[in-house]
Image (cartoon, helix red, strand yellow):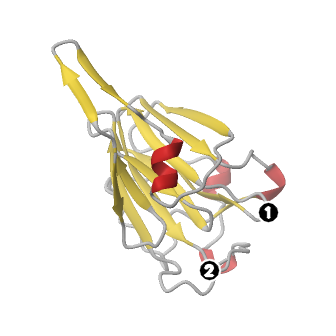
Amino acid sequence: MNMISTKLDGVFIIEPTVFGDHRGWFMETFSNENLKSSGFNLDFVQDNHSFSATKGTLRGLHYQLNPKAQSKLVRCTRGSIFDVAVDIRQGSPTYGQWYGVELGADNKKQLLVPKGFAHGFMTLTEDVEVQYKVDELYAPECDRGIAWNDPSIGIKWPIDISPILSDKDAKAPLLKDAEQNFHYGE
């Protein structure tokens, strides 16, 4: 398993080792031991699985407030997505900056998104399945979001169309108006 750092401190791309032969392939999708040896002490407590039927579906940008903040380990097991993390830690040198990477069934990459980051993705193909682990249970009272098209963040989404959004995501506030309680270094 190869851990690749990104421009956002704490956000990593994980490239699993894939073993293939004439029958197909095998890979470890998660190893707590490998994460711990890389300096991560995460206790994942829930697995989530989403399906999006239409190319251009956008989910996010989502996060949960402290004390129910979530770290996420995201992978796309069918189709492909453009996966994004946005730093929302007050005092961070990269506050309001984003990082995006294509995750897909073909490249098998994963994105590790720690607490203090908003997360979202856009589907790049039809019939997309995304699976992710979280280290805190869903807490609706702490559930928050940021507008996917906030000009202060300036995410360059790869598909230039009006995305398919939930009502909640369509009404999400700008970063400057969003409730946040994350602080860099905590």
Q: Nearer the viewer, residue 141 or 21?
A: 21
Quarter of the image that includes the N terminus:
top left
Give neighbour class at mark 2: few <14, some 14-19, many 20+ (Cα, 10 Å). Answer: few
Q: Percent from the top left, x then y, of residue 65?
A: 74, 64
Q: Mark 2 to mark 1: distance in Å? A: 16 Å
Q: Percent from the top left, x then y, of residue 59?
A: 54, 49
User: Could you tell me the amino acid type at mark 2?
Assistant: Gly
The residue to which callout 2 is attached is 185
Q: Residue at 48% of width from left, 40% of height from top? A: 31
Q: Residue at 21% of width from left, 24% of height from top? A: 20
Horizontal placement of 46 versus 119: left or right?
right
Q: Percent from the top left, x then y, of residue 160?
A: 33, 56
Q: Is residue 41 above or below residue 180?
A: above
Q: Secondary structure at mark 2?
A: loop
Horizontal placement of 106 versus 39: left or right?
left
Q: Residue at 49% of width from left, 86% of height from top? A: 93
Q: Is residue 11 above or below residue 123?
A: below
User: Could you tell me the amino acid type at mark 1?
Assistant: Pro
- Proximity of marks 2 and 1: CB atoms separated by less than 8 Å: no
Q: Percent from the top left, x then y, of residue 81?
A: 38, 45
The residue to which callout 1 is attached is 67
